Amino acid sequence: MTSEISSDRSSNTSRRNAVRKIAAGTIVLSGVSSVVQRSQGAAMISKESPPTESSWASFRATPDQRGVAKSILAEKPVLKWEFASPDGWVACVAIVGDYVYAPALSGYLHCLNLKTGAEIWKYRSIEDADPKKFAPGFKAAPLVTDSTIYIGDEDGVLHAIDRTTGLKKWVFASDAEIAGCVAPFGENLLLASHDSFLYCLTKEGTEVWKFQTNDRINCSPGIADTYTFLAGCDEHLRVIDLNTGKEFRDMPLESFLIASPAVVGDLLYVGTHTGMVVCVDWRKGEFVWRYEGPRKMPFHASAAVTDDLVIVGGHDKHVHAIDRLTGKVRWTFQTQARIESSGAVVDRRFFVGSGDKNLYGISLDSGEEVWKFNAGRGISAGIAIGEGHLIAGEDQQNGRLLCFG
């Protein structure tokens, strides 16, 4: 795999070194911080709403990364508002309370009013407010907690941002792009980086321990019990004991992964670049089943997992619904272009975007289309469903966030 970091690597390295020194308290913050811009006439968030069951506070909503919403959503969702960004959106948004936290490729994290789409504040990944100055973009989804937003950028810097003010609390620098969402574990945070390390940090940004794999980690770390699960370019599934920071299991997967794993008990589900969806017993280190569609093409989207189904879209232009226990296909749904959007489940419906410019709602029971919206542009960002709304993003120039309720 080749790196997708677009900025100059030597300047990135210099910036990371400076951020490390800042974190250590050895230099004064200058030129590597953040800038917050508040929209004219917009009020600050007066009171933080902690995430609840109806929120979508991280990439796949819950630490087990099953992609199942506990919110409600209208039978026929209606477009409520749009919000455009110059470089579009590849990351899933977070929805908590009355607010949306939307990471843009242009290097801004936008805080928006959920009901109206009005911008409350925006945080930039660099201090310089000059719009012509390159700012590392946000490809990872944010993690939203009671008071803080945690999000990594494509320069490898993790930002901790105050939810109320949009001001920086602290930063932590890894050595390469951060593509996955931060995961919470007790009083700590888990951060996976393309520098091949999993970092365990305190909520104040201090490193507790780190674990090295053999290549870039693409996924958001999933959590079950006291274990986390890593996959990426080294073609291994690694199970890490979070109490010790030591490896519990190393299992070859025979493919690199872009997708993040979902976990149900001792079973883990993920799609691979070589065109298979696998179910793994992570305690035993054994494959339970392997699923391969009629056309063996990559699965880059993360699967949604219900009590009975594993549902995921692939580069073969199909959504596949697989029996969770047997690995046999229940149904497939065809679109007209490849699917990279990580879909989400609400009640018995699966919502997903496609490169064919449509956003689909599909019945989990029949595999039939129950709703469709033509956006006019391909939708590749992950789907978020929270607080009665669905939000999807377009990965194109002047791409829009689309909010439905």
Image: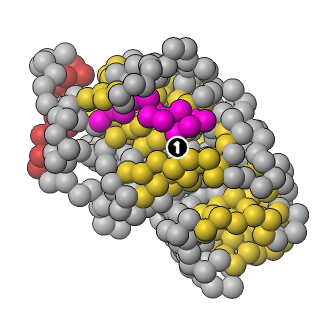
Location of residue 91 in the rendering, given as x and y in whole percent from the top left corner: 47, 50
At x 29%, y 36%, the residue is: 124
Identify the residue at the far right of this view. Answer: 365
- Residue range (magenta): 111-124
Location of residue 364 in the rendering, given as x and y in whole percent from the top left corner: 83, 62
Residue type beneath disc 1? Val
At x 56%, y 47%, the residue is: 81
Residue nearest the observer in this picture, 304 or 341 = 341
Location of residue 368 in the rendering, given as x and y in whole percent from the top left corner: 82, 71
Q: In which quarter of the image is residue 243?
A: top right
- Which residue is the site of mark 1? 93
Residue nearest the observer in this picture, 289 or 404 = 404
Q: Viewed as shown, does residue 60 lie left or right of 89?
A: right
Q: Does the magenta stretch include residue 239?
A: no
At x 81%, y 52%, the residue is: 75
Q: In this view, does 75 lie above or below 235?
A: above
